[in-house]
């Protein structure tokens, strides 16, 4: 039996034709018509006016902070239940991350906790320079109250939609909220360019500045002239060609992952102690990953025992993200709340959810879980 991965790349069948088109054009550098088209197609899909294709979602986060002027001495508030890249980008600027807890409805940033914390920070004269709200595991955070709270206190909102392309919030696409937003096209995401990301902006000046910084901040001179530090962050034209083929197949991928989630809920939902990550009433999740918590007081096997059983069957599983405020590298950073995200980490499991997962492979996963 072949190994079953958590979320492997899924080829649509159109990638080779797009790559051949790019190669035939002679544009193989990090510029070219495929990249221009990919940026335009992402803008049309998400509903943001400007996009900059970059080498990773982390690069997009870093440049989002740079164009907002974030630097040493600033605080940036961040959802704590997410991958380390979100806070790493804050550290790149010299700023300090402050971590905010999740709420039960969506596992995402708690809007009430945020509003209270911003009110306190405003009273103390110490508001954050920006907020990064993460859309977790394919589901949008409750973005309307988050955006309202940020607007009230003049705090720019960065929507980290790295895991949520194709999801919606009250009918609006993930990645279309806030001053800036970011997408990831890493190999495990719902669409991939092998590696890559995108910065989306409402303000053309932000997009232009990010594009300038992403190409080593070269000034418009005959010689190589540099007045500020830049980065080698631009997305390759070849990888953009792959992204275009993947993006054209996005709706099928979303439906496939939603069907996988529905089957898991149907065939594992009766297990004692199991509770699947809820789909919030305000939106439509892609279920990029199907996640659940296993209550050790009621389950016959805890989270780690299930993961061990999956590993023994050559099936990849994973705990839910470890909250960033518990990560050793961020041990000196402040956290606001933390109990909800800590519980989700202690008991949470992610199951194989790739859009190329076959019914037989999913049966293997289900059987392994039930056997455990």
Image (cartoon, helix red, strand yellow):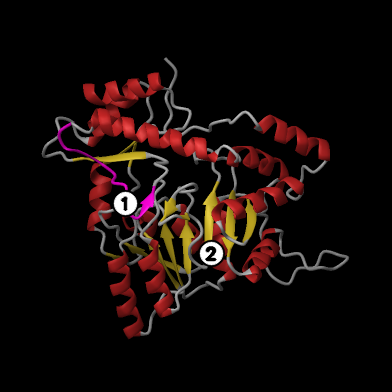
- Residue situated furthest top in the rendering: 1
Residue 325 seen: yes
Residue 343 in the image, given as x and y percentages of width and height? 22, 50
Q: Residue at x 55, y 71 (%)?
A: 68
**Up/down of 52 relative to 71, above or below:** above
Which residue is denoted by mark 1 in the rendering?
280
Residue 151 in the image, given as x and y percentages of width and height? 43, 75
Q: What secondary structure is the stretch in magenta mostly built from?
A: loop
- Residue situated furthest front in the rendering: 171
Q: Secondary structure at mark 1?
A: loop
Q: Which residues are magenta?
A: 271-284
Q: Residue at x 63, y 52 (%)?
A: 54
Q: Residues within 10 Å of mark 2 (few under 14, many from 20)?
A: many
Question: Which of the two discs, 1 and 2, labels the residue nearer the N terminus?
Answer: 2
Q: Secondary structure at mark 2?
A: strand
Classify residue 251 as left or right of residue 220: left
Q: Quadrant of the N terminus?
A: top left
């Amino acid at each position: 039996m072949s190994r079953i991965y958590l979320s492997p790349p899924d080829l649509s069948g159109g990638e080779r034709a797009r790559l051949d088109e790019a190669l035939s054009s002679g544009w193989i550098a990090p510029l070219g018509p495929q990249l221009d088209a990919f940026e335009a197609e992402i803008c049309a899909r998400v509903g943001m006016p400007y996009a900059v294709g970059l080498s990773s979602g982390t690069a997009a986060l870093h440049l989002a902070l740079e164009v907002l002027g974030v630097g040493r001495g600033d605080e940036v508030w961040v959802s704590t239940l997410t991958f380390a890249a979100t806070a790493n980008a804050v550290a790149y600027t010299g700023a300090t991350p402050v971590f905010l807890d999740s709420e039960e409805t969506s596992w995402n940033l708690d809007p009430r906790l945020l509003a209270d914390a911003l009110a306190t920070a405003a009273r103390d004269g110490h508001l954050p320079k920006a907020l990064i709200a993460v859309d977790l595991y394919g589901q949008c955070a409750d973005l309307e109250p988050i955006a309202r709270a940020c607007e009230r206190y003049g705090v720019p909102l960065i929507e980290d939609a790295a895991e949520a392309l194709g999801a919606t919030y009250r009918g609006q696409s993930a990645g279309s909220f806030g001053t800036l937003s970011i997408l990831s096209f890493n190999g495990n995401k719902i669409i991939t360019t092998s590696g890559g990301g995108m910065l989306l902006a409402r303000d053309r000046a932000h997009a232009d500045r990010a594009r300038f910084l992403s190409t080593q901040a070269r000034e418009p001179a005959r010689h190589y002239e540099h007045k500020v530090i830049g980065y080698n962050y631009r997305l390759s034209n070849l990888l953009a060609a792959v992204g275009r083929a993947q993006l054209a197949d996005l709706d099928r991928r979303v439906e496939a992952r939603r069907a996988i989630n529905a089957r898991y809920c149907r065939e594992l939902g009766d297990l004692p102690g199991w509770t699947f990550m809820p789909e919030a009433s305000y939106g439509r999740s892609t279920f990029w990953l199907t996640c659940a918590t296993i209550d050790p007081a009621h389950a016959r096997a805890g989270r780690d025992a299930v993961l061990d059983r999956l590993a023994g069957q050559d099936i990849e599983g994973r705990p839910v993200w470890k909250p960033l405020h518990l990560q050793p590298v961020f041990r000196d950073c402040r956290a606001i709340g933390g109990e909800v995200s800590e519980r989700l980490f202690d008991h949470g499991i992610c199951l194989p959810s790739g859009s190329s997962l076959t019914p037989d492979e999913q049966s293997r996963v289900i059987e392994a879980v039930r056997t455990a």
